[in-house]
């Protein structure tokens, strides 16, 4: 596939609209998969690829907004472009708050939809990259021993080896060895990079705020 | 006095009878004769003075004439028995003086006795008359006493009856008044006093102008005069301000008449119906609001659903068109995909058309519950329903209804919906008008439709009117001049009227505003 495996999902209960949208998206060279209900989409096993969802607000059974909430709940994030026959402002505000990238009211210009789709895919692509990076960092962090994690926490807090040794009740030499292990396992070239990695996986220095920091 | 004119009748005594009186004269003279003759045998001379006694007695007893009879008989007996020659009526010459003296004495005694009797008699008569008069006077006096007592009793009864009446009138919640024919107050009840803050002794001789504002007084007095002219009880609704604010009354007014039938006053009994009026008004407004809400929701739901139904295939048509263009723009053009897209366009275009056809058919074929309907009745109902809206927007209403119209066979509710829609549209078209009166006029008249009798109903407003383009398109679906409108109302109205075999049309007025009118065929052979 030209666009690098990215895929667009369409959920609309109206067959005319569904078919037309599917064909339009396909006509610009995107991979597209259509569903006639929210339930059907939830049951579908999504491939691991950049994707976005074109979703009709008014659906029988489970509505578009219900589906959005369900996706947030199951931590399967996907950028959503809402389309609606008669969207009102509270409804669109709610949708955007929940993370929708676009809210299009019918009749909309098809180019607007295609632009929104491209934008959503781009968003998802970078989000996926970010998620992948976080996963990798977390994996590296998992490989640290308990003592190494303690040392890392204090290092990113900006403490010197001597201070860390005092904090943990160990010798400066031992701390130096642990610190070398942390840098190697986390694949960090510098303290600055280590701090960035720690931030990504949510390790902060706040827990040690009582310690005197130089 | 009648009773004094009654003649006094003297009592007649049995002895006053003339035969008895004459009989007594004869007997007494005979008795005197016999006594004198018998005594004459033993005495030196016969006691002829007994005849005097007989005459005196006869005259006393019987009056003048029996007295004269006794006198004559005594003279004859004297001449026969006691003058020589005895036993003969011939009197000896020398006895003549004696006879004459006797006759004169007897006559004198008789006359005197008779005169005395007459005097006694008349005295007795006078006394009797006096007695009668006294009795009569006593009777009259008693009668007068009785009459006086009777009058007192009657006056007491009248006072009691008046008091009872006043109590009744004072204790009613109604306002009661009596005015003379010049419309000056004669009597008012306590409720009147309370409401208008006046005293009954102050209001005598006053008129309505002294009690209520001038224009209201004119209004009320107009009603009073109608009653005086008509001569029969009439009922009016009057709005009269008092310290409690404007109050609605139902007043029954009628004439009070003397026994001869001549009217002398106007009486009014007015009941306060303000609370009832307010309740009615609230009910009417609630009904109008309900009708409006249900109309709006029905129309909005229907319109929204139709809009959605049409919007979907139209959106699909546009999208498929774009997809088709994209397929044609690739190199080489993907003709198979382009063809698929065009087939979808055709299919969806037809689908959109079908939706409109279906809705139209739905309205047309909706099962009508037709019955005999009077369009005037529909108009009255709708004006009642829209009353709140009309007042809220200060729209004047005028109706010109022909009450001899034939009825129509129609679904009352649908007809009501159509008319209500036209009326609401008319009101809306006038809400921005400030430089001229907002007037809604509704007319019903006999018309013809394809040569058959029909009823025409015209709804005319003085609103913003219709442009030529508006006239052409006003009955199309989704055409609207209203910011919030869906443009379905008149389209549905026309469908309803056509389903009844009629026509709904619109035209601009000569002056300002527009007229919407519909014609419905008359029901055969019936009148509303």
Image (cartoon, coloured by chain):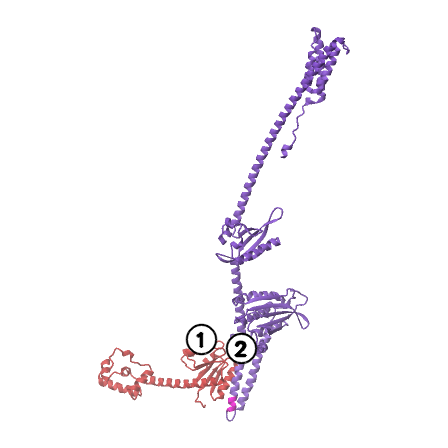
Chain colours: A red, B purple
Quadrant that contains the N terminus of chain B: top right
User: For this view, does B452 lie left or right of residue B158?
Assistant: right
Mark 2, secondary structure of its residue: helix
Residue in front for this viewpoint, B122 or A105? B122
Magenta part of the protein: which range? B325-329
Residue B436 visible in image = yes
Q: CA distance from mark 1 to mark 2?
A: 21 Å
Q: Quadrant of residue B54?
A: top right
The chain letter for the residue carrying disc 2 is B
- Return the chain for callout 1: A
Rendered location of residue B517, percent (x, y) = 61, 71
Q: Which residue is mark 1?
A: A90
Horizontal and vertical percent position of residue B68: 72, 18
Whether B326 is among the magenta residues is: yes
Classed neighbour count for the residue bearing mark 1: other residues with Cα under 10 Å, few (<14), some (14–19), many (≥20): few
Do the residues indicated by labels 1 and 2 lie within the same chain of the protein? no
Give the main secondary structure, helix, strand or loop, of the magenta stretch.
helix
The correct choice, above or below, for B525 with respect to A194 in the image is above
Q: Nearer the viewer, residue B421 or B70?
A: B70
Q: Is residue A143 visible?
A: no
Residue A70's spot in the image, x, y percent? 43, 77
Along the viewing direction, whichever of B438 and B181 lies nearer the viewer = B181
The quadrant holding residue B23 is top right
Which quadrant of the rendered structure holds the C terminus of chain B? Answer: bottom right
Q: Is residue B501 above or below residue B222?
A: below
Query: B184 and A182: which one is in front?
Result: B184
Query: Label 2: few (<14), some or many (≥20) within 10 Å?
Result: many
Q: In this image, B246 relative to B49: left or right?
A: left
Residue picked out by circle 2: B307
């Amino acid at each position: 596939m030209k666009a690098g495996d990215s895929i667009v999902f369409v959920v609309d209960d109206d067959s005319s609209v569904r078919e037309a949208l599917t064909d339009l998206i396909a006509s610009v060279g995107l991979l597209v998969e259509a569903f006639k209900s929210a339930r059907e989409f939830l049951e579908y096993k999504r491939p691991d690829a950049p994707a976005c969802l074109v979703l009709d607000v008014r659906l029988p059974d489970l509505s578009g907004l219900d589906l959005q909430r369900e996706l947030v709940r199951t931590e399967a994030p996907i950028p959503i472009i809402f389309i609606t026959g008669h969207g009102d402002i509270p409804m669109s505000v709610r949708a955007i708050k929940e993370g929708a990238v676009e809210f299009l009211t019918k009749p909309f210009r098809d180019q607007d939809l295609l632009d929104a789709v491209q934008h959503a895919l781009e968003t998802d692509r970078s989000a996926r990259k970010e998620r992948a990076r976080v996963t990798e960092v977390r994996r590296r962090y998992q490989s640290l021993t308990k003592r190494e994690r303690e040392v890392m926490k204090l290092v990113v807090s900006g403490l010197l080896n001597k201070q860390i040794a005092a904090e943990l009740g160990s010798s400066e030499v031992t701390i130096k060895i642990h610190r070398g292990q942390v840098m190697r396992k986390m694949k960090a070239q510098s303290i600055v990079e280590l701090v960035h990695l720690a931030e990504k996986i949510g390790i902060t220095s706040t827990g040690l705020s009582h310690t005197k920091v130089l | 006095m009648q009773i004094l004119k009654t003649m006094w009748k003297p009592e007649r005594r049995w002895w006053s009878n003339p035969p008895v009186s004459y009989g007594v004269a004869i007997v007494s003279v005979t008795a005197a004769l016999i006594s004198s003759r018998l005594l004459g045998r033993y005495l030196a001379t016969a006691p002829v003075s007994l005849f005097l006694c007989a005459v005196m007695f006869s005259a006393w007893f019987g009056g003048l004439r029996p007295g004269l009879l006794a006198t004559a008989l005594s003279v004859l007996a004297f001449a026969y028995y006691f003058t020589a020659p005895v036993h003969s009526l011939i009197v000896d010459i020398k006895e003549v003086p004696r006879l004459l003296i006797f006759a004169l004495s007897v006559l004198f005694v008789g006359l005197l006795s008779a005169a005395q009797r007459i005097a006694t008699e008349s005295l007795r008569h006078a006394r009797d008359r006096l007695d009668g008069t006294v009795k009569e006077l006593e009777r009259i006096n008693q009668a007068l006493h009785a009459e006086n007592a009777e009058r007192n009793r009657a006056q007491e009864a009248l006072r009691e009856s008046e008091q009872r009446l006043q109590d009744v009138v004072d204790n009613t919640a109604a306002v009661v008044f009596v005015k003379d024919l010049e419309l000056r107050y004669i009597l008012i009840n306590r409720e009147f006093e309370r409401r208008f803050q006046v005293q009954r002794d102050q209001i005598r001789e006053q008129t309505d102008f002294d009690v209520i504002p001038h224009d209201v007084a004119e209004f009320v007095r107009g009603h009073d005069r109608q009653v005086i002219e008509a001569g029969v009880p009439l009922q009016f609704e009057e709005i009269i301000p008092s310290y409690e604010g404007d109050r609605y009354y139902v007043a029954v007014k009628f004439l009070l008449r003397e026994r001869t039938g001549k009217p002398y006053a106007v009486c009014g009994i007015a009941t306060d119906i303000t609370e009832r009026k307010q309740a009615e008004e609230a009910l009417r407004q609630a009904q109008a609001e309900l009708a409006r809400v249900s109309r709006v929701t029905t129309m909005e739901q229907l319109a929204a659903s139709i809009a959605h139904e049409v919007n979907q295939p139209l959106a699909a048509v546009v999208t498929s068109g774009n997809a088709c263009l994209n397929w044609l723009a690739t190199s080489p053009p993907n003709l198979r995909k382009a063809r698929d897209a065009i087939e979808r366009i055709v299919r969806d275009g037809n689908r959109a058309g079908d939706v409109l056809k279906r809705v139209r058919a739905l309205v047309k074929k909706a099962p009508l519950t037709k019955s005999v309907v009077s369009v005037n009745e529909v108009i009255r109902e709708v004006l009642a329903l829209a009353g709140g809206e009309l007042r809220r927007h200060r729209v004047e209403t005028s109706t010109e209804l022909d009450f001899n119209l034939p009825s129509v066979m129609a679904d009352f509710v649908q007809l009501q919906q159509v008319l209500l829609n036209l009326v609401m549209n008319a009101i809306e078209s006038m809400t921005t008008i400030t430089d001229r009166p907002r007037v809604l006029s509704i007319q019903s008249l006999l018309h013809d439709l394809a040569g058959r009798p029909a009823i025409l109903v015209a709804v005319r407003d003085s609103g913003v009117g219709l442009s030529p383009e508006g006239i052409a398109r006003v009955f199309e679906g989704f055409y609207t001049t209203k910011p919030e409108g869906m443009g379905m109302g008149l389209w549905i109205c026309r469908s309803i009227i056509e389903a009844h075999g009629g026509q709904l049309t619109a035209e601009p007025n000569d002056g300002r505003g527009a007229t919407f009118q519909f014609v419905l065929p008359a029901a055969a052979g019936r009148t509303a």
